[in-house]
Image (cartoon, rainbow, N blue to C red):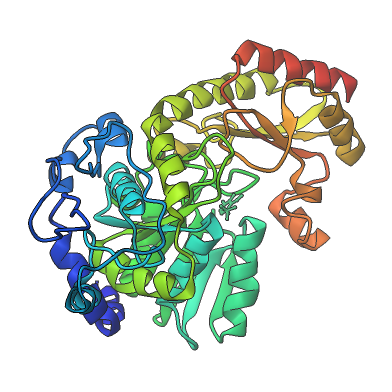
Amino acid sequence: MNQLAALAKYSAKEVRGAREASSSEHLVPVKAPKEAAMKDTPPVSNTRKRKSRTNAVHAGTRRSQYGEVSEAIFLTQGFVYDTAEDAEARFLDAGREEFIYARYGNPTVAMFEDRIAALEGTEDAFACASGMAAVNGAMMAILKAGDHVVAARALFGSCLYILDDVLRRFGVEVTLIDGTDIDAWAAAIRPDTRVAFFETISNPTLEVIDIAAVADLAHAVGALVVVDNVFATPTYSRAMELGADVIVYSTTKHIDGQGRCLGGVICGTRDFVRGVAEPYMKHTGGSMSPFTAWVMLKGLEHLDLRVRAQTGTATQIATALEGHPKLSRVIYPHLPSHPQYDVALRQMDEGGTMVAFDLTGGKDAAYRFLNALDIIIISNNLGDAKSIATPPATTTHQRLPDDQKAALGITPGLIRLSCGLEDSGDLIADILDALDAA
Ligand SMILES: Cc1ncc(COP(=O)(O)O)c(C=O)c1O
């Protein structure tokens, strides 16, 4: 909290308008900003008491004077002021209901931010151009030269680039550790550590990191816990409750869920989101477009249904594959054979939508398997309605040196499977047939 207050101080003036305005849920008409409020919608503070399926459909809704059912796309970069004085006043006081420029804020984007914050259970959220804009923005907004960061080494390639390359170039000291080893966190965290960063379930080997244990260690020295929660999804996330301070998503994955747009979001306290993340993001250009926000809003409406269906399929696939003679291991957080099974049970109600497995025949067998798939597509997104198989060693994690791949278990025969919405029996048959051919 002390860190948050310190980080927020330089930007307090910029966020004044945002905080004052955030209690209102009314859209303000362009022609008469102070007079005609639009249709009543419940304030976010009330919607937070509702169940998450209800919030996914209604939270954050702002209706225009036309009373549209589906959220409006305000596909505009800017806003018109009646007078020069109005323009001046708006620049002084633009907040969550009065907008000046889409890089700073937009009504459609604000709806998405409020809805995802309600789902995640955080006070606020800032929508970003991509998941990587969100990871980079969260870290750069917090850190300065001379700071120390501890991060789990099992990271998506671009996350590792930010930690291992970008931050170091800007004078941040980074210690990478085995994130599943709590003793390693205890040894690496120092009094000057500012951030503990990790993927709550790592890409692609599905390591599960104990959020509460890391948060205890980090908070003891006043460090912030920043987590990339993509694989856990908002449906199963209890990251904030377990001690995470900042939760980042690539909304390109489950939140869109249909492979249409790149997006990201930074969730956290209002002080952090509006006082620390927003000033960095809005001035450096990583904001989400209104069109993308609209796609993400529509995605959120059925996120829970999709993720639960996909998780049911993932559980069936993982169970069906375990012990298959052509596989050396099947990785799924809720299989008892998972190395962090206990943590996964504590931290997640279900095992999630992702399964990984390793073909004993290595790269050749993995490629024969992939090329024999009939329904499941070969690609590198995840969380999509379409099931997707990825060979991480030669695609998403290609740039990692071989010794690092070996240390992380990213073997040539590893397949990462994102389970989609197809019939689970069809998918299992597709995988078993392809394994026969491998
Ligand atoms: C764990 C994780 N974090 C971040 C990202 C980056 O997201 P985006 O592609 O939206 O920038 C990905 C993408 O695969 C990911 O898997």
In the rendered image of this protein, does residue 112 appear above or below residue 82? above
Q: Does residue 33 appear anywhere in the picture?
A: yes
The answer to whether 147 appears left or right of 50 in the picture is right
Q: Does residue 52 appear anywhere in the picture?
A: no
Q: Position of residue 83 (x, y in %)?
A: 20, 73
The answer to whether 124 appears left or right of 192 in the picture is left
* Residue at (58, 18) in percent of width and height: 316
In this orientation, which residue lies closer to the viewer: 268 or 99? 99
In the rendered image of this protein, does residue 361 appear above or below residue 21? above
In this orientation, which residue lies closer to the viewer: 272 or 185? 272
* Residue at (50, 58) in percent of width and height: 129
In this orientation, which residue lies closer to the viewer: 345 or 83? 83
Q: Position of residue 37 (x, y in %)?
A: 11, 50
Q: Position of residue 292 (x, y in %)?
A: 47, 48
The answer to whether 211 appears left or right of 66 in the picture is right
Q: Which quadrant would the C terminus be assigned to in this image?
A: top right
In this orientation, which residue lies closer to the viewer: 393 or 380? 380
Q: Position of residue 115 (x, y in %)?
A: 30, 44
Q: Which quadrant would the N terminus be assigned to in this image?
A: bottom left
* Residue at (17, 59) in percent of width and height: 22
Q: Residue furthest left?
A: 35
Q: How many numbered marks does the figure carry?
A: 0
In the rendered image of this protein, does residue 147 appear above or below residue 115? below
